[in-house]
Image: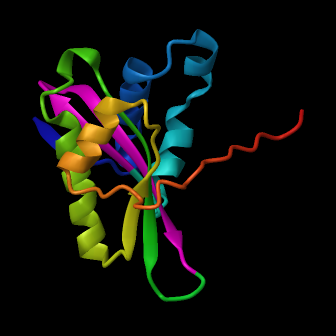
Amino acid sequence: MLVRRLQSEDSALARKAVLELKIRDSALSESLSVDYLSTFLGRSENYFIVAMIDESPVGYLVAYELGRIDRHQTMILCYELRVAKAHRRMRVGTAMITLLRSLCDQRKVLKMWVHTTKSNVAAIRLYESTGGVADPSGDEITYVYTPEL
């Protein structure tokens, strides 16, 4: 298995990974352009990590590096992680998180975090097995705001 962070020149591979592992809606697939992904991947604060087996994407991870107001360090939000059903429980997620943690170490990132739900047992197992520590208060809640159309 090859796991690596994609760059702007890898936009066609990024599109393939998203289409194969996430988007099943043909209208959405048409709107996901290689040009957009090239711009997205070209931003240093955007992380798109892909896991490949035999040149086919079997997983991807999206993360964002965020600046802090109180110190000259950044944080990374691990926003989305997907693994093809046929490759789950084969350490694909572990390999992608391991690479992201290595990139965090290289950049001297203050912390990395990820949100999930208590009902997502597979995600909890993955995050704990890769060194993640749940908020001890158990008090965090995620609110989502969507624009009014």
Residue 57 locus on image (x, y percent): 26, 27
Closer-to-camera residue (134/2): 134
Residue at the image position 33 percent from the left and 36 percent from the top: 123
Residue 111, by quadrant, is: bottom left
- The x and y percentages for residue 145 are 75, 44
Residue at image position (39%, 32%) is 12
Q: Give the quarter of the figure containing the N terminus.
A: top left
The segment highlighted magenta reads 48-68
How would you classify the magenta stretch by its main secondary structure? strand
Q: What colour scheme governs how the chains and residues are painted in the rendered image of this protein?
A: rainbow
Task: Estimate the x, y position of residue 83 in percent, counting from the top left.
Answer: 29, 28
For this rendering, which residue is in front, 141 or 34? 141
Residue 63 forms part of the magenta stretch: yes
Q: Please identify the quarter of the rendering in which residue 99 is found.
A: bottom left
Q: Is residue 53 left or right of residue 64?
A: left
Magenta-drawn stretch contains 56:
yes
The image quadrant where one finds the C terminus is top right
The vertical placement of 121 against 134, above or below, is above
Asked whether residue 80 is in view, the answer is yes
Looking at the image, can residue 4 be seen?
Answer: no
Q: Residue at x 45, y 75 (%)?
A: 74
Q: Residue at x 56, y 28 (%)?
A: 32
Q: Is residue 127 above or below residue 112?
A: above
Residue 129: image location, x then y, percent: 18, 47
